Amino acid sequence: MILVTGGAGYIGSHVVLSLREMGHEVVVLDDLSRGHEDLIFSPNFVQCDIRDREAVGSAFARFPIEAVLHFAARSLVGESMREPEVYYDVNVNGTLSLLSVMRDRGVNALVFSSSAAVYGEPERTPISEEDELRPTNVYGETKLFIESMLRRYHEAYGLNSVSLRYFNAAGADPEGRSGEDHDPETHLIPLVLDVALGRRKEIAIFGTDYPTPDGSCIRDYIHVTDLASAHVLALKSLIQGKARCSAYNLGNGMGYSVKDVIDVARRVTSKPIPASAGPRRPGDPAVLVASSDRAQKDLGWRRAHPELEEIVATAWEWHRRRFSR
Ligand code: UDP
C-alpha cells in the first residue's frame, strides 16, 4: 500500500488517481487545511497533521505501507516570506517527523514533492539538475533543505528517495475528476479563468518590462496529469529496489509568457478576459524553463499533454464546473 501525504490537494489528488489506475492501493493522509474532502480518491483516509507523530505512526501501524509519496506542505511563496516560521515548521519539521516514523517502521522508499523554487534566479535556460541551487524565498529554502535531509538519510540510514522538482503545475484531470481549488488563489491560470467566468474583473500582469520578447514573465507550464505519471514512474523505480537518492526536473521544456497564457485562455474560453499591466511581483525571475531530459532518460517519462491549449482547456472545463454560480 502507498501512503500519499497531502493526497487531498491539487497535485496529490491527481497522483492518487494515477496510482489507482496503475493498480496500487493507496492511503491518503491529509489535514484538510488546504485539501478538499471531495478530492480524496481512495477509500483509505487518515485526517491528521503531518507534524502529529503519533497519528502518523498509527497510520503506519494500521496500513501495510511500503512506500510514501510526500506532498503535504505549505506552498505559497509570498506567504512563506510573511510567515517563515510556519513554513519551517510544517515543511521541515513535518517532513522530519514523517522520516522518523518511516525509519521506525522500516519503510525506506519516498517520492518527494520538490520545486523549481530550489533554483532561485537561474543563470541559464533551460535549467538542468546540475545548476546551482540558490532559492530566493523561504518556500524554496524548505524544499532544498528537505532534499539535503533526504541525502543524509540515504547515506546514514539507507532511505531511497526521488525528489521531483516541479515547474508550473497546471491543468486538470482530463476526465474532470480533479483540478485546482486554492483559497486564496494566487496562480495565473485559475485567476485568468476566474476573469473568464466573471468572478474577477481583470487579470493583472505582474511586470511588463522584463527582458523577454513581450515583456512579461516566461514560465514552463506542465500538465498535472503528466506530473502524476512521473510520480508513478519514480515509485516504480524505488519499488524495483534500486538504491538511489536522486532529483529530477519536471517541466514541458517550453516557455510561455503571461501574455501568451492570457491569449490562449481567450481562445479556449471565447471570453474577452480584460488584462492590465501591473508592477512586478517581488522575487519573480524573468524566465523559468526546465530541461527534463534526465527524467525522460532515467524514468522513461513521456508527457502526454504538452500543449498549452490542452492545459488551459482541461483547467477551464474543471474551473467552470466547480466555480460557476
Ligand atoms: N502572474 C501574473 N498575474 C497574476 C498571477 C501571476 O502576472 O495575477 C504571473 C507571475 O508573475 C508569474 C506567472 O504569472 O510570472 C506564474 O505565476 P504563478 O503564481 O501561477 O506561479 P509561480 O511561477 O509563482 O510558481
Image: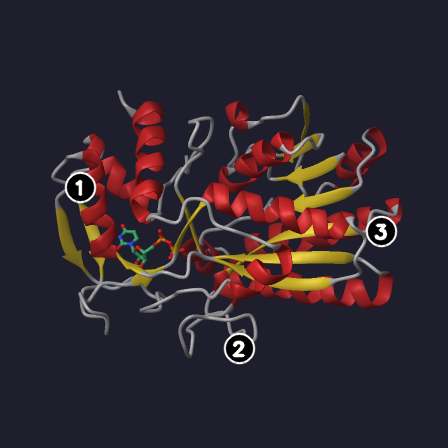
**In the displayed structure, would residue 256 be above or below residue 50?**
below
Please tell me how crowded label 2 is: few (under 14), some (14-19), or many (20+) other residues with Cα within 10 Å.
some
Q: Position of residue 153 (x, y in %)?
A: 79, 62
Where's residue 39, x and y in %? 52, 27
* Circle 1 residues within 10 Å: few <14, some 14–19, many ≥20: some
What residue did someone put label 2 on? Answer: 132
What distance separates the C-alpha of mark 2 from that of mark 1?
37 Å
Q: Based on the displayed image, in which of its 4 quarters is residue 255 positioned?
A: bottom left
- Residue 74 in sight here: yes
- In terms of sequence position, does the residue under pointer 2 or pointer 3 come before the other? 3
Which residue is tagged 1? 266
Report ligand 1 position as a quadrant: bottom left
Above or below residue 89? Residue 310 is above
- Residue at image position (78%, 50%) is 240
Mark whose residue sits in front, 2 or 3: 2
Q: CA distance from mark 1 to mark 3?
A: 50 Å
Q: Decide if ligand 1 comes within 8 Å of the CB at mark 1.
A: no
| Quarter occupied by residue 312 | top left
